[in-house]
Structure formats: structure tokens, C-alpha cells
């Protein structure tokens, strides 16, 4: 068979197996492949996919897409909703087809989510040299575009001889299914090697199972963690995405309820507890709630579960102000378990570690004083969100009210999708989620353009989850800036009849960076969508661009509902979402277009994010911002361990 035929048949027979509690799981690891064909892969992987489509359409279904980066985002969205048990493969041509995947690779690796990338490469034999789209380096002629994947992938290999395929795929799938190492797996396939003949052992093409590793914690670590938790006066749990990937929500809830320890969550950790749970403080950090941040400021012990402690989570290392604060970190990945200098890293599956802690902590309860503060701060923040959701500005509504209306209109099992701009931060603070699968915001890479493509990946997973029938509704919330980056996957949804609901918020610019620019003294420079004032060469003060994104979506085949500005806009939005939800599966994408006022901010998190301000400036606004910056900077801590809990 050809090398490409071997790749396709091998991938079609790989299975993920897992066991969580008393439930066993076995499913296709790679349920399908995306691809855009060019001279790099049309006669290789393209031919193999066509051959198997004729011989056995179920072996490796092929899916179209309109952009290679978007195809990788679909794979990532699918992988996250299936809790890293499944993902898609993506085949590309050489040159720009391959380099279009680079952002997708970085996003997958940053988010610790699996995706299998199969970019084509130039001739291994150099029989035709240089070929169209080949990159030439005089100092290293073996360097190709695909070498750019090396720092962006958790595993990279290049198959320059057919016999290398066996080890390349085996090692690649080992990394793909390892919860501690997963990310982008890139196997570069030269276009001539793809079409070469190879003798393939039957064992290589037999069904194979890849078991998800879920290591148990060391008993000594659990005993020491229990001792430190009992000794702590103000403990706080920071729940990350690892809680969800380990199916540890029940164990976390048991720990919170039995001990009274409050829980704050990261972007990836939203859904680890229901928003109205008594111990749920909500989001923590720069885009957090005042409740979580108030408790974080005084906490003497942080119990991190499945979090990588990015700067938004720690408010750029200003969130934890107790001079004796210490960390107990539970994570399947050592790189995360050892962060902030902890002397107690628990390298283990989150569910198994939490279950062991529950057993070790029997009878432990936080103080009445801490419990009362949790209740007070939680009530204060809930009232703040209620007020923000109730805003009825006219003629243009606030983004807060749009979020509230969307939240109310969705069912508990539905999924909200977002990635970049001001929306992720506002959703993190205010979105009220009850289902562990109900919130999907890509924020490790915060990639503009992810929303619609990632939402399609989630929708595919939701349809598969429902056995092909009526599944969860998937609602994408996206601003005009991110929509313009990568909206063309709406065409993919039209082609397959995938019912994706898109709430498109038009604010004529970059609301998030506009607000950040203003706070840093840069006066929203370059963040408005305006016509050019050629005399002063500025885009800041011209007329609003005559762009009609609703008509654009219609032209791509989507059903569009336009929400007219005015006092009824929020009611009309809720009604439009209800109509969209009532549409049958198979009806294709539905876009709901609404305009907002970008100058109305979300409630403050009473927190900070470290973005440096120019220390020298002629602008008064920048000078004032620099003084504010230095005040915040003085509260930043190295978090290198120590503290009373470590003694």
C-alpha cells in the first residue's frame, strides 16, 4: 500500500479506552480527518481518503473546511468537549497550507489539548528542487516551513523514509493520549513519501487501544496535604480545567461540601461547581469575581487542582497577599504541580487525588468566620451581576445585558463558546453555568477567530454525544473583530447542516484592547473601525465603517436574525435565541446580530493584570497610567514557596 493509505487505515483503527469510577469507555481516537488539498497531499493523503471512502466510508470520514487553522480549531473544540479522549487529524498541502496550521498548533499545545497535524512537506528525494512553495535557507537546506512546528508541538517528527512511519505514528499517538504531555502532535509527510509503496505488517493495521493514564497519588503526599489543610485558617481551592478532564467534579463538590473550603475557578475550570453552590466563589484573578479575589487575598493555603496558574489566574501574582501563603498543587503534569515553589506537588490524576483527600480529611471543617465571609462575599457579587444583567441602555445596549439575556435564554445543558476580546473576561466573571460541559472559552492562547470554528468542533461532539440526534445547543458569542478574523467556517456549517447559534456583537472595533489601551494611557489608539483621516493619518475619529456583518453572514448561507437597537433589544435578543433553539437539527447555522456600546464596562474584579506602561511619555494620560502601574507593581510577589504551611 502507499504510505498515505497506511496512515489512513492505521488511524481508523485506533481506540481510546478509559475507566472512571465504575464506568468504562471505548471510542475512536480519530473519528475523522479534515483536509484542504493541494499539490502536497492531493495524490497522497487525498487519494487514500478517496480510496477508503469508496471501499469503507466508516473507516476515516473526511470533512471539508475553509481554512487550515480553523480545521485545527474544530479538532481542538471536539477534543475539549470529549475531555481529551478524541480529536481529529488535519491534512494540509505544503507551504502556506502547512504554515496556516501554526497558530492552531500553538493553541492546542498552550491549552494542553490533543490535535493530530499532518502537514505535507517538500520532496524528501529533492528530485524536483526547489518546488513550488518551498522555503530555501542557504545555511540549512534541510530546513522547511514545517520546522516551525517544532517549538509549537508536544511531538514532532518528519517521515523522510516510508519505514519511519511505524515509529512516527506510534510515538505521536503515545503523546496524543498522554494527559500530562498532550498537545499538538505534528508528523510532517513529504509529498513524494506520501505516495511511495510500503510493505505494512498486518499487526500495524490491527485495532489498538490507548488507555488514558490516570496515576494515583502517593499516600505520603495525601497525608501531608491533609495535615496542611487542617492547619490552615483560610484555605482556598483553585479549580482548573484538569478537574473537568479528570471527571473530578463530583469529588471536588464532595470536598467543598464536607470541609466548607471555598472554590474559585480558572477560565478552563468554569463548570467544576454550579455557580449557585454555597462554596462557589466563581472566577478568580484578573477577570475574577470580587468574592473569589477577596478570599484569595487573605488565603494562607491555596489548593490548586488541575490549574497551570497563568497570569490571569494569579492576577499577575498579586491575588495572593497573605505573607504566609503556601501552595498544595494537584496536577497530572509535573510542570504545573511544581509551580510557585511548592514543597508539596502531588503529581496525580485530579479525581483520584481528591477522592483520597476526601477520605483523609473526614471531619475537617473551616471556621465559622470563614464560612460567613464566603456567604457575604458571594451574595455581594451575585447582586452585582444581577444589576449588570438588568442594564437597559438605549439606543445601544451593554455587553453585560447581552450576556445576561443569552445566559437566560439557554438551557443548562447548552454550551457557550468564546475565545478572545472583552467577552471572555466578562463571561468568566458573570456567566452562570450549572453543567460541567456548559462553558467553553479558549483562553490559554486567546485566539481571535477560534469561536466559530471551535464551536463547530463542540457541535460535532455534541451531536456524536447524542447519537446523531438532538443534542446540546452550542451558542457562540463573538465580537465583530474576532468574527472578521475567521467567519468563513459558517460555510462549513451550511454544507453539513450543523445548527450552530452565533450571537454576533457589533461594536465597531476592538472593545477589549480599546479599554486596555485607555487604562494604559494610549487613548484607545488603533482600536476603532473608522475611515482614515488622511491629513492626520488617524483611524480614531473618522466615520464608522459601512460594514454590514448580518448581510455578510446571509451571503455565506446562514439564517440571520437582526436585533434592532432600542429599548426592546434585550427582549428581542432572548426571543431570537429561543427561535434559534427551536430550529431543528440539520437546519444549519443561525446568526443573531446585535449592536452594543463598547464603552460600558463589566463590573470590576477589583484585581489587576500586568501589562507594562511606558515609563517615559509626553502624554499626560500615559504618565498617569504609569503611576497607577507602579502602585500595582509594588504588590506583585514572586510566589517562590515558603509560608507557614510549608514549615
Image: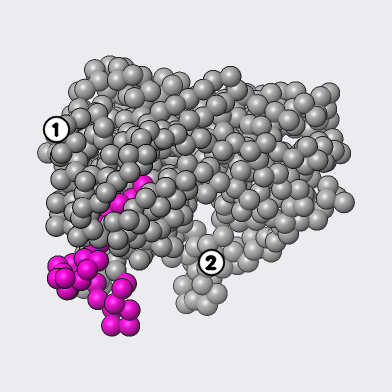
Q: Position of residue 299 (x, y in %)?
A: 76, 43
**Based on the displayed image, in which of its 4 quarters is residue 106 positioned?**
bottom left
Q: Secondary structure at mark 1?
A: helix
Can residue 404 be seen here? The reply is no
Near-viewer residue (227 or 371): 227
Asked if the stretch drawn in magenta spans residue 127, the answer is yes
**Based on the displayed image, in which of its 4 quarters is residue 71 positioned?**
top left
Q: Describe residue 555's horizontal placement relative to residue 395 as left or right.
A: left
**Based on the displayed image, in which of its 4 quarters is residue 15 positioned?**
top left
Q: Describe residue 629's horizontal placement relative to residue 38 as left or right.
A: right
- Label whose residue precedes the other's in the sequence (2 or 1): 1
Vertical placement of residue 323 versus 569, above or below: below
Near-viewer residue (134 or 598): 134
Q: Can you identify the residue that label 2 sits on? A: 612
Can residue 623 be seen here? The reply is yes
Residue at x 20% of width, y 23% of height:
587
Q: Describe residue 646's horizontal placement relative to residue 604 as left or right.
A: right
Residue at x 56% of width, y 29% of height:
247
Q: Can you identify the residue that label 1 sits on? A: 54
Mark 2 to mark 1: distance in Å?
58 Å
Name the chief secondary structure element in magenta. Answer: loop
Residue at x 67% of width, y 36% of height:
216
| Residue range corresponding to the magenta coloring | 116-143
Tell which tag, 2 or 1, sits nearer the viewer. 1
Circles 2 and 1, Cβ within 8 Å, touching? The answer is: no
Asked if the stretch drawn in magenta spans residue 592, the answer is no
Residue at x 24% of width, y 17% of height:
584
Q: Position of residue 487 (x, y in %)?
A: 24, 44
Q: Describe residue 439's horizontal placement relative to residue 370 as left or right.
A: left
Q: Position of residue 169 (x, y in %)?
A: 38, 49
The mark found on residue 570 in the picture is none
Q: Secondary structure at mark 2?
A: loop
Amino acid at each position: 500500500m502507499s504510505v498515505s493509505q497506511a496512515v489512513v487505515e492505521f488511524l481508523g483503527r485506533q481506540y481510546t479506552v478509559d475507566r472512571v469510577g465504575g464506568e468504562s469507555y471505548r471510542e475512536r481516537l480519530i473519528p475523522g480527518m479534515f483536509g484542504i488539498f493541494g499539490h502536497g497531499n492531493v495524490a497522497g493523503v487525498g487519494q487514500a481518503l478517496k480510496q477508503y471512502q469508496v471501499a469503507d466510508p466508516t473507516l476515516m470520514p473526511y470533512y471539508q473546511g475553509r481554512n487550515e487553522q480553523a480545521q485545527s480549531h474544530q479538532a481542538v473544540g471536539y477534543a475539549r468537549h470529549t475531555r481529551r479522549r478524541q480529536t481529529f487529524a488535519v491534512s494540509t498541502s505544503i507551504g502556506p497550507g502547512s504554515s496556516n496550521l501554526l497558530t492552531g498548533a500553538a493553541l492546542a499545545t498552550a491549552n494542553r489539548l490533543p490535535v493530530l497535524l499532518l502537514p505535507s512537506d517538500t520532496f524528501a528525494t529533492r528530485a524536483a528542487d526547489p518546488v513550488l512553495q518551498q522555503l530555501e535557507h542557504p545555511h540549512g537546506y534541510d530546513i522547511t516551513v514545517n520546522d516551525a512546528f517544532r517549538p509549537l508541538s508536544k511531538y514532532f517528527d518528519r517521515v523522510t523514509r516510508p519505514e519511519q512511519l511505524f515509529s512516527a505514528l506510534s510515538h505521536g499517538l503515545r503523546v496524543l493520549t498522554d494527559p500530562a504531555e498532550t498537545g499538538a502532535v505534528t508528523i510532517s509527510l513529504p509529498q513524494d513519501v506520501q505516495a511511495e509503496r510500503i510493505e505494512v505488517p498486518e499487526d500495524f493495521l490491527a485495532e489498538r487501544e490507548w488507555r488514558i493514564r490516570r496515576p494515583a497519588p502517593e499516600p505520603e503526599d495525601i497525608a501531608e496535604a491533609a495535615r496542611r489543610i487542617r492547619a490552615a485558617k483560610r484555605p482556598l481551592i483553585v479549580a482548573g480545567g484538569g478537574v473537568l478532564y479528570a471527571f473530578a467534579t463530583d469529588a471536588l463538590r464532595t470536598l467543598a461540601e464536607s470541609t466548607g473550603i471555598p472554590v474559585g475557578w480558572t477560565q478552563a475550570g468554569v463548570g467544576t461547581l454550579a455557580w449557585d453552590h454555597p462554596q462557589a466563589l466563581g472566577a478568580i484573578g484578573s477577570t475574577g469575581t470580587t468574592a473569589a479575589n477577596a478570599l484569595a487575598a487573605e488565603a494562607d493555603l491555596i489548593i490548586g487542582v488541575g490549574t497551570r496558574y497563568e497570569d490571569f489566574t494569579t492576577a499577575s501574582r498579586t491575588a495572593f497577599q497573605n505573607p504566609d501563603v503556601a501552595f498544595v498543587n494537584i496536577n497530572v503534569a509535573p510542570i504545573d504541580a511544581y509551580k510557585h515553589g511548592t514543597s508539596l506537588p502531588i503529581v496525580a490524576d485530579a479525581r483520584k487525588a481528591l477522592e483520597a483527600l476526601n477520605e483523609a480529611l473526614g471531619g475537617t471543617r473551616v471556621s465559622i468566620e470563614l464560612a460567613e465571609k464566603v456567604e457575604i462575599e458571594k451574595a455581594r457579587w451575585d447582586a452585582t451581576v444581577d444589576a449588570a444583567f438588568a442594564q437597559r441602555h438605549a439606543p445601544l445596549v451593554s455587553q453585560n445585558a447581552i450576556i445576561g439575556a443569552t445566559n437566560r435564554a439557554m438551557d443548562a445543558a447548552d454550551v457557550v463558546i468564546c475565545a478572545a476580546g472583552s467577552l471572555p473576561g466578562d463571561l468568566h466573571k458573570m456567566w452562570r453555568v450549572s453543567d460541567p460541559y456548559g462553558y467553553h472559552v479558549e483562553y490559554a492562547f486567546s485566539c481571535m477567530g477560534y469561536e466559530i470554528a471551535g464551536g463547530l468542533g463542540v457541535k460535532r461532539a455534541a451531536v456524536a454525544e447524542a447519537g446523531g440526534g438532538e443534542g446540546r445547543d452550542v451558542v457562540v458569542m463573538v465580537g465583530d473583530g474576532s468574527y472578521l478574523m475567521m467567519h468563513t467556517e459558517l460555510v462549513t456549517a451550511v454544507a453539513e447542516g450543523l445548527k450552530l447559534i452565533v450571537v454576533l456583537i457589533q461594536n465597531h472595533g476592538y472593545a477589549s484592547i480599546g479599554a486596555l489601551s485607555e487604562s494604559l494611557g494610549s487613548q484607545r489608539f488603533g482600536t476603532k473601525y473608522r475611515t482614515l483621516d488622511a491629513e492626520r493619518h488617524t483611524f480614531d475619529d473618522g466615520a464608522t465603517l459601512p460594514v454590514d456583518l448580518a448581510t455578510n453572514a446571509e451571503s455565506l448561507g446562514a439564517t440571520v436574525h437582526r436585533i434592532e437597537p432600542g429599548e426592546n433589544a434585550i427582549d428581542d435578543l432572548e426571543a431570537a435565541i429561543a427561535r434559534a433553539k427551536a430550529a431543528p437539527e440539520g437546519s444549519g447555522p443561525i446568526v443573531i446580530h446585535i449592536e452594543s456600546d463598547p464603552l460600558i464596562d463589566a463590573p470590576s474584579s477589583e484585581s489587576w493584570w500586568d501589562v507594562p506602561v511606558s515609563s517615559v511619555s509626553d502624554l499626560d494620560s500615559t504618565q498617569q497610567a504609569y503611576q497607577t502601574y507602579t502602585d500595582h507593581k509594588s504588590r506583585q510577589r514572586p510566589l517562590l514557596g515558603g509560608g507557614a504551611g510549608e514549615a
